[in-house]
Amino acid sequence: VNLRRTVDLFGQAGFDVVAITDHVVNGESTYGKVANRFKFSLNKGNFDAYFSQIREEGKRALEKYGLLVIPGVEITKSSLSSNMSAHFLLIDIKEFIPASWNYEKIFLEAKKQDALIIACHPHHTSELMVIDTLYLWNNRQKYARYIDAWEIANRDDVFNVISLKKYPYIAGSDFHRVRHLYSWKTMLNCEKEISAIKQCIRYNRGVAITLFRNGVPF
Amino acid sequence: MEFHFNSKRKVNMEIFWIISGLTIIGLIGFGLQVFAIHSYTKTTRRLGEEQDSIETFPPISIIKPLSGLDDNLFDNLESFCRQDYPKYEILFSIQDMNDPTYRVVENVKKRFPEKEISILVERCNEGLNPKVNNMLPAYRQARYPYILVSDSNVMVDQDYLRRIIQHMQDPKVGLVTNLIRGVGAKTIGSLFENLQLNSFILGNVCFLKKFFNISCVVGKSMLMRRCDLEAIGGLRAFKDVLAEDHFIGENIKKKGQEVILSNYMISNVNEYWGLKRFLNRHLRWGKMRWKILGYKYFTELIENPVLLSLPCLLFEGPSTRALILIASVSLAKGIGDFYIGEKISAQLHPLAYLLSPLKDLLMGMVWFMSIANDTVVWRGKQYLIGENTALFPYLQKGVWTWRDRFADRIRARIA
């Protein structure tokens, strides 16, 4: 789903805020090489164009739907082993951060840019054709201090481990197809403003998750 | 032995020619539908030019029953707020505060503070028809002498109200309804939906108007005087029928007033439909037509030349002439649909019309299934439909309980 259509879908559905986070794939793995070769990944060269496109769409979305669009990326460290794979969002970053850097370096750079760090689908999912991304969860003692929130729900999956560990939580939609609009979403009790949203997620007060459904079970 | 073989061949030959004859009748019927659409849309511009000179614009109450997020909902609703019309109110009617449409209408209302927009949230269970239930609170609140019932999935141009109100200058006119085109398909389900709306539904509506002067009432847009609607019992009188739009039109006609099919075309935006939703809607509509038309429903088979041409495969096998017949009928149907699409600006890719014969085959299946049982599922609720689309609660009793349990078990297995 392209950016314009994504913005329209969320705007038409009455959402207040959406974060656009395209993938930045690490170039070392086979998966990453393929993604980079076929331009499925953001890189330093196309990052500025990506950002300006989001900014333009953001202006349109705010004017037309009152929808706040926050730019970000999904750092995608994929490998054939689920224990070595990790995906995490950097929301409201200002400059490009390559996925090939090590975890600490990426986290520190993201903190420097005051970006929000969110661990995506950190536990086993119900997807059969997708490799789980367990690296951050398996190494949580080491990395939890950098992570602002963990995805507690993604599409149809709910990760109860996040709740058990009492980590700060957020829902994510992992939006790749139109039908993914109807999935777990987050409700935040804060002003519709980027800094307030980031603060609300970091402090993790007034955060609720809800399963967004259309209500027309035809 | 040879005699037997020859006689069988002769019988097959005869059946082939009968099937070909029926298919050609079907194609002629389709050709007449295309002609009806052509001539009806041609008069649109002429009428439009004439109508600009009329200057009386009485206030209108627009009732919008909402349930769930339709494709393009925000823009659809916004198009009604942008009407170039002196005085009108919009009543958004929702059954449940938790319906996701609530957020959307709130945004729309915020965006047009100068417009008379009301959001009514009321759970109304007066009847069995969920759409009428949804409209009743808004109908009670409506303040103006003209009532426009308009579905949430339609989008209109700025001059829509100005154009349709013109017909109401004549006191003999009791109801104005509109031609509808399906636009915006982005998935296979919505593509089929729009092809069906633009070819079968629009074709039949125009055909009946052109050749039999029958105006079919389509609930997506119905403009009435409040006093006329009250005289036939108000919306409440139609709370227990499935085809409330059809019966409102029939009662207006019985009252001695005319039902006008305005040639002002409105858009039904269907973008992201799944195949299941498409089939379910047309199954419901098929059952509705079966209950209203009775034996006349069988004439619909003739209107599906692609389906009619198929049985020759059964009798002939994949012979050259059978394949030529099917291919040429499918081609003719695709070209006809393409012409209609271009004529009404349906915004479909030309290659999409290649799927038109496949859609017709699916609709053929739906045609048979519509006769097979009397239950419908609408907005998540199941009903039994009786004569004249009267709705009855679907009670799980006796053998039905077992049928449902069996179906649930299969569904659970598949899931």
Image: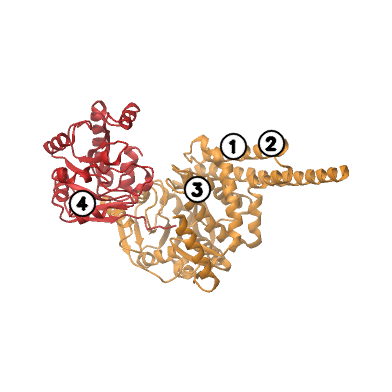
Q: Position of residue B323 (x, y in %)?
A: 68, 38
Question: The chain drawn red is chain what?
Answer: A
Q: Residue at x 50, y 48 (%)?
A: B193
Camera-side mark, 4 or 2: 4
Q: Position of residue A20 (x, y in %)?
A: 26, 40
Q: CA distance from mark 1 to mark 2?
A: 16 Å
Q: According to the image, label 1 marks what residue?
A: B335
Say if labels 1 and 2 share a chain.
Answer: yes
Residue B193: assigned label: 3
- Dots 2 and 3: beta carbons under 8 Å? no
Q: According to the image, label 2 marks what residue?
A: B324
Camera-side mark, 2 or 3: 2
Secondary structure type for disc 3: helix
Other residues around mark 2 within 10 Å, as few (<14) / some (14–19) / many (≥20): few
Question: The chain drawn orange is chain what?
Answer: B
Label 2 chain ID: B
Q: CA distance from mark 4 to mark 1?
A: 55 Å
- Dots 1 and 3: beta carbons under 8 Å? no
Amino acid at dot 1: Ile
Looking at marks 2 and 3 on the same chain, the residue that comes earlier in the sequence is marked by: 3
Q: CA distance from mark 4 to mark 2?
A: 63 Å
Say if labels 3 and 4 share a chain.
Answer: no
Camera-side mark, 1 or 2: 2
Other residues around mark 3 within 10 Å, as few (<14) / some (14–19) / many (≥20): many
Amino acid at dot 4: Tyr
- Dots 4 and 2: beta carbons under 8 Å? no
Label 3 chain ID: B
> Which quarter shows the C terminus of chain A?
bottom left
